[in-house]
Image (spheres, rainbow, N blue to C red):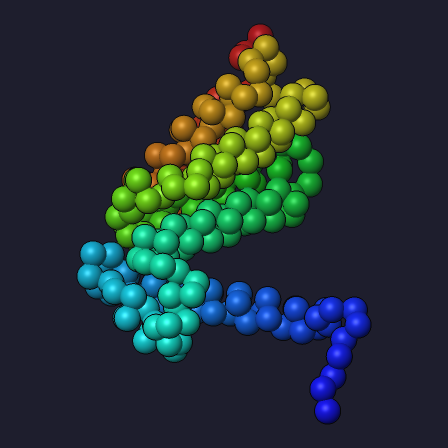
Amino acid sequence: MNMMYSGGVPRLWNETIEEHRRAVNDAALDAFAALIGEHGLASVTMSQIASAAGIGRATLYKYFPDIESVLVAWHERQIARHLHLLEQARDAADGPAARLEAVLSAFALIQHEHQGHSPELPAVMLHRGGHVTAARHQLHALVSGLITACADADQIRSGVPAGELATYCLSALGAASSLPSEAAVRRLVAVTMAGLQPPPG
């Protein structure tokens, strides 16, 4: 007997399909990350990704047409996860200055922890779709908003636009990627925060 749904495809069915798609997507990206960690980006093939992910090649090609598209999707996921970590750090802190320091610390630690652990990513690939630019704008807006809140609470220097101070912070903390230890990262965050303080007198 044929079953007819007058209201279209049931919501539960749609949700199940979406969960399956996310699971396949995540499995492919996880496999890709593991393979580039073991063999390097240049040697990874679509067949290897499908095998490591436990999915068929035909299924993989439904999601990703080539290695470049897998790379971009993986990088987009990394960026989204990092932004989520920064938002969690912000929400866990209490007070404007504490929130700013928490976000800057989390950002610096991300920079430090990923030194040498990511594949060498062709710039032309990673800028496809503008996801890197969009993420940078989102990050800058996050830090600018926190700086504005600190300024409103008279907790940092006045007279310098929040956007400029955000650029200063992010540029300074980019150096965390080359520091030898987490202790050095914490010192860099402290120096950066000190640069936001009002001048003596």
Residue displayed at 28% across by 70% down: 47
Q: Residue lying at the far top in this picture: please name it.
A: 201
**Most foreground residue, 127 or 77:** 127
Q: Is residue 143 visible?
A: no
Residue displayed at 59% across by 71% down: 17
Q: Position of residue 82 (x, y in %)?
A: 49, 48
Q: Give the vertical position of 147 relative to 27 (above or below).
A: above
Q: Position of residue 53 (x, y in %)?
A: 38, 73
Q: Quadrant of residue 168?
A: top left
**Most foreground residue, 99 or 184:** 99
Q: Is residue 82 visible?
A: yes
Q: Position of residue 21 (x, y in %)?
A: 53, 67
**Most foreground residue, 168 or 62:** 62
Q: Position of residue 144 (x, y in %)?
A: 58, 27
Residue displayed at 24% across by 63% down: 44
Q: Give the vertical position of 129 relative to 7 (above or below).
A: above
Residue displayed at 43% across by 63% down: 63
Instruction: Count up the numbered dots.
Output: 0
Q: Give the vertical position of 189 relative to 196 (above or below).
A: below
